Structures are given as structure tokens and as C-alpha cells.
Image: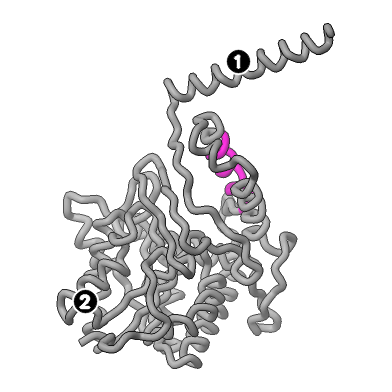
Amino acid sequence: MRRFALCLMALASTCAALAAVEAGFRFFAPQATKVSVPVVLDQDLIYRLPPNASGTDVKEEFAVRIETNSEGLRDRDYPPAKPLGVRRRILVLGDSMTFAEGVEAEETYPKVLERALAERYGVGRYEVINAAVRGYGNDQELVLFERIAPIYRPDLVLLAFFAVNDPDDNLYGGVFRLDGGRLVRVPLSQAASPKYRYYVRQARIQTFPGYRFLIQHSHTINFVRHRWAQWEFVREFSAPAALDPDREERAWQLSRAILTEWAMSARRRGVRPLMLLIPSPRQATEGRDALIDARTERVLGLATEIGVPAFDPRPALRVARAGSTALYYPKDAHMTAQGHRVVAAFLEECLEAAGLVR
């Protein structure tokens, strides 16, 4: 009996301590209690977003709604074949810069571009599908394109290359490797893919019984969740303290092979490949970013070599930075709605100049 009473006292003390901690967070350091869209593990893509899902992304500088369509993309549903009257369907691939964290779905540059084309050429003449997924590298974008191209049957595919982390993501993904200069698909495993290893843990947590309830009701759990996720991310993906030339070259050669295969894959399907360079905040505002500039020039050179038009919005963003509205979030570093508007207007000009819209 005495042992039972001691256990009850210990339990009561623990509950009281947890309640005090929760009260402290609620009063002095309140946390966002919103649930974002979870990831779903995928043996081809590493992970994807679930279809017809919804959630809210909350960070210090923004809170935006995330909703996915029947294919798990952050866009509305489109019919498999182009409806009558549609001149061209454009499929956009990319990462979180295009997905895009920090703005609502209709504020992303693909959707701003779609509305601009509708205003100029008529509603429904051009469709722009946002198939970007946050966290994706070019390896995953290639695999995703080959999965959904037969569904959407686009005329143009635009790959948004983000030099800040795309080459690194291609290494972390472990989806492909080079064998004597030849691109080879690698069976997905936690040993070979740090990205897969990370998202396996994320998926386990997000599917743990009671997870959604705890996130929606506990400030303490949210504090622990964010700190743990940051620690895990740094542990798996932190860049070397100093530039490693050998690693940088390996990342570039792999990226080069992936982008070349993507362009060939598009052409085999009768789809015209295009590229868009997404500048870093420093490239857009300060005009220079040594490592990222070097990566950008390599991509521009590759695009010329493989005959893919590459659109570089750095000049347009540098002109726009003189305005009073920020183009990037200062802390999060994703583009603001104004940044997306500038990129959309630039893209519209490029597509018109290339004769791809008329």
C-alpha cells in the first residue's frame, strides 16, 4: 500500500511539474500549435506529400496554409489531358523556393504567371502547374517528372534550379550515383541516403499515435519538436565548415548528369525543357555570392551545352530591390510575395521573347 501511495505521489508530482512547464511556455514563450502537412515515405521519391491534405506552416515571419491536390502537389486539380482551348500546359519543378514556403499558394510565381497569361491571352489558354516540393533536389525532381508527366502531359517543363542547395541535395539524396560517368539509379536505403534516413524518422514521429493532438494542444511539445528537428537537420545536412573542393566537384558532376538526363527525358516525351535560376538572397540584394555565383555559372554553361533555355532573374530582382517591399524574408530567406511577383513578371517576358506564349 505504501509503495502504491509513493507511486501516486510521484505521478502527481510529475504531472504538476509538466503542467508548470506548459504554463510557463504558454505565458512566457508561446509556441505555434498548428499542424503542417506530413510527409509520406516513397521508395522512388524518398518522400512526398499526401494527396488532398491540408495544414498550416508557421514560422517566426509568416503563417501560411498548405493544401495539396489529388497528386499531392500544392496546386488545384487539373484534368489528365489538356482541355480544348488550352494552348500550352507548363509543369514547374523545384524545391521550397517554388513550393513556396512563406506565401499562400496563389502568391507563388507559377500561379501569378498563370493569372498574368490569362489576363493577356484569355482565361484557360495557358495552364501553369506547380509541381515543386519543399526539400527536393534535382534527383527527386527528375523522378517526380517521370512519374507525373504521363498524367499531366505538359508541353513545357520548367525546372527551377536553386544553386544554394540543389547540388548538396543531390548528394544527400542518394537516389543516383555516377558509375564511370554514367548516371545509375541506386536502391533507396537509410545507409546510402542521409535524406531518406532523416525523413524516415520524421515520418515515424508524424504518424505516432496522438501526435496531431499533442501538436495542437501543447506548447511544450511544440518547443521540443522544433528544437529536435533543427538538431536532426543540422546533424544530417550541415555543410562542411570550409569549402571541400573534391566534394563540390562530386556534387556538380552528379548534378550535371541528373540535369542532362532530365532534359533528355523531357525530350523523349515530346516536352520542351526550360530552366529558371532561383537566386540566393545575397545574389538578389547584394549582387554577389561567390560560391553560389560559381554554381550558377556552371549551370548556365550546362544549359547552353545541352540546348536548354535558362532564364536568370538576377537583374530583375536587383532592380526590384530598390523598392520598399522586401523580396526575401530576412531570417527565413525564402521569397516574399513581392519576390514571387517579380519572378513571375520576368518569366512572362522570357516566355514571350522565346515565342513560347503568344
Observer-nearest of 86 and 91: 86
Q: Residue at x 26, y 71 (%)?
A: 113
Camera sees residue 259: yes
Observer-nearest of 112 and 150: 150
What main secondary structure does the magenta stretch of the protein show? helix
Q: Residue at x 40, y 88 (%)?
A: 272
For the record, the magenta segment spans: 224-236
Q: Which mark is residue 16?
A: 1
Q: Quadrant of residue 313?
A: bottom left
Q: Amino acid at mark 1?
A: Ala
| For residue 219, above or below residue 300 | above
- Name the mark nearer the viewer: 2 or 1: 1
Q: Residue at x 40, y 55 (%)?
A: 66
Q: Residue at x 38, y 66 (%)?
A: 75
Give the CA distance from mark 2 to mark 1. 60 Å
Observer-nearest of 218 and 303: 218
Quick one: label 2 or label 1, which is nearer the N terminus? 1
Residue marked by disc 2: 117
Residue lying at the far front of the rendered structure: 1
SS of the residue at dot 2? helix
Left or right, residue 78 beside residue 145: left
Camera sees residue 291: no
Q: Which mark is residue 52?
A: none
Q: Amino acid at mark 2?
A: Leu
- Mark 1 neighbour density, 10 Å: few (under 14) some (14–19) many (20 or more): few
Q: Quadrant of residue 188?
A: bottom right
Magenta stretch contains residue 35: no
- Residue 123 x/y as whole percent: 20, 77
- Residue 90 x/y as whole percent: 35, 80
- Residue 229 x/y as whole percent: 57, 44
Image coloring type: one colour
